[in-house]
Amino acid sequence: MKFRDILQEVQSTLLANRMRSILTILGIVIGIAAVITMSSLVSGMGESLSKGFGLQQSKVVTIMAGSDASEASYEALAKAMPQIYSSILIVDNSVSSSFSVEGNSKTITANYIIGSSDEYAEATGLQCSSGSYFTAQDNASAHKVVVLGDGIVKDLYGSKNAQVVGEKISILGDSYTIVGVADSSKSGGTLMTDTGTTIYMPFSTKRIRLNSEGSIIGLGMLKDDPITLDLDQIGKDTQQTFGSILGISDWKDAINVVSAASMVNELNSLVTAIALLMTTIASISLLVGGIGIMNMMLTNVTERIHEIGLRKSLGARSRDITVQFLFESIILTILGGLIGVIFGYLASGAMVALINVLMNGFDLPLSVDPGLVLIATAVSAAIGLIFGYYPARRAAKMDPVEALRYE
Amino acid sequence: MKSFSSHDSIHFDSSRTGNLATASQSVPYHSPYVIDAQRLTRVYRSPAGNTYALRGVTLRVKQGEFLAIMGSSGSGKSTLMSILGCLDTATSGSYYLEGEDIKTKTDDELASIRATRIGFVFQSFNLLPRISVIRNVMLPLLYTACPVRERIPRARAALRAVSIDEKLFDHMSNELSGGQVQRVAIARALVNSPALILADEPTGNLDSETTDQVLSSFESLHRAGRTIVLITHESDVASRADRCVYIKDGCLYDSVAAMHNARKVV
């Protein structure tokens, strides 16, 4: 039999039993759609988490040594490891209490105030939608200037896009000038804060004006691409070096070094593991669908025993019968897979829209891999092949005389 | 009923049928017999005991002969038909089809023989209900090397040979009368220009008028030189053949008297 003959025979068989064919492939449709929806939701969640925690600045290594660390000690660390770090920025993001912030005749509570150097924005990728980050002079002179996260601008002034540069706000009774608005959609910041709800001011301003005595964190800027580096070893070396600078013997416990890149890797591993788990669960429905295919094909073979005998009497070899029934199974499952892909894409879009609406302001992206179409088709064909083989062989092995006599 | 002559425009003349018909003539063939079966035995073994469906049947059918095999139910005629049609193999004995020893053939070779050299006509017609008349007739061509572009012309010629109206070619088989369906089945048996047509009770499910039409088709094919073996339990049908043999309890006889005297065919 030629391939076009097989396709023609399969087409006439499937069209003759439309409802049965539709019901049979339902398991495959649901299975493929579930797998695609699960994987796109998990993938989107991973993207959203990465972006939300500011993990895209993978060259940043966060160094925390508690109250033992000072500006000078971080400067010493930068000098001690010049081959690893191009610079180490100091950040005061200690939170001893929430701050009351007044502006535009409103009062809100701010939980995150970061005191940093002027290099912080460039180093971490923080971008201002209006105005600009404060300057080195602002830091040197402990000027009372702030950059507000756009979420705080929205809370005080009604809109993220309100023109607030030059406006004054009051923190603990002291007046500060807004010099810029941080764009949360373009991330920035470190692991610890959400850009939109953070107030940024010069490091010295926070230490002096707000009397902050909290721990200072160092943000080490890696010289080289983290992909080329052994981040675990760099972390250990930094702990050890900083420990000797600070005179701490138990530096493994006292000093914490977290690289954004390794966090991204761990997060990706976690996302992959979750995706794998959910895909495995969704794949159970594919197994059920495959069993349904086998059941239908066995019924098909039983119903067409007479036809099998006829075809053999007309000259069909055993392998012609095998191929015909196997292709019926494979084409059916491929069809189910393609329909499942369409439903999967639609369901992913609907789920993303629903989640974003229900979680008010959450921006879960729609993350669908076009390569899934090929994978879904291949998986569907494999299911058709595996679960269609036994019925096809059973058909092929039939004795033509017995088959022709079958009522 | 359209009369059929050897000069008809349909391509059942072997010189015009290219690969398919010449397949049946590709093996050197010196015997005058299309069928040369000697002492065929068929035993069905089961835990309940052995059943002897054929007991040393010897049968020779010449090229162009129209033979009827008469027997009642359980006589072994269907078993004989299955063996002659290469659907089943004898337990013992020899069977030469156009001079070829069938016992030495593999399953695939037997399938090829059925596709190219034997045309079956069944009592229950056995057309596929989900495809059209012309596609039913084309069905045997799927299992041969017939080029795709030749399939429809061959099928149309076969249908015309059995006087099926062209308007019915694209109809489904369940839209045809019993007689038309059986003639379509005959067309299907002819489409590969087989050396042998085997008809198993072809008129068993038909009324007398339709029976006459179908038998006239067989007679036309016979006049055109076809070798036909027809199995029946009806003497009226058997009488339309050139020769009739009788089968009873697995044994073949050349006359009713011989059957009663329990003499075997020589």
Image (cartoon, grey):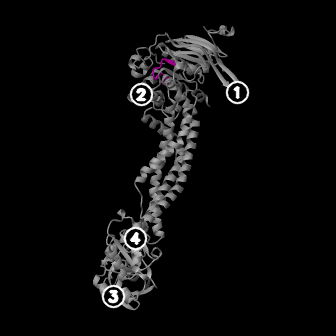
x and y, in percent, of residue A79 in the image: 32, 76
Image position of A144 (left or right of A277): left
Q: Residues within 10 Å of mark 3 (few under 14, many from 20)?
A: some
Q: Secondary structure at mark 1?
A: loop
Q: Are marks 3 and 4 on the same chain?
A: yes
Q: In this rendering, do the residues under marks 1 and 4 share a single chain?
A: no
Q: Are marks 2 and 1 in contact (CB under 8 Å)?
A: no
The mark that comes first in sequence, 2 or 1, is: 1
The dot on residue B151 is 2
Chain letter behind tag 1: B
Nearer to me, B155 or A24: A24
The residue mark sitting in front, 2 or 3, is 3
Tell me the distance, in whole angstroms, between the alpha carbons under discs 3 and 1: 105 Å
Q: CA distance from mark 3 to mark 4?
A: 37 Å
Q: Residues within 10 Å of mark 1 (few under 14, many from 20)?
A: few
Q: Which residue has dot 4 on it?
A: A237
Q: Label 2, secondary structure: give it.
A: helix
The amino acid sitting under disc 1 is: Pro
Q: Is residue A262 left or right of residue A305?
A: left
Same chain shared by disc 3 and disc 1: no
Range of residues picked out in magenta: B187-197
Q: Is residue A396 visible?
A: yes
Front label number (4 vs 2) = 4
Instruction: Please provide percent x and percent y for residue A257.
Output: 42, 73
Q: Nearer the viewer, mark 1 or mark 4?
A: 4
Chain containing the residue with disc 3? A
Please say whether residue B209 is visible from this viewpoint: no
Residue A92 counted in the magenta span: no
Front one among A390 and B202 = A390
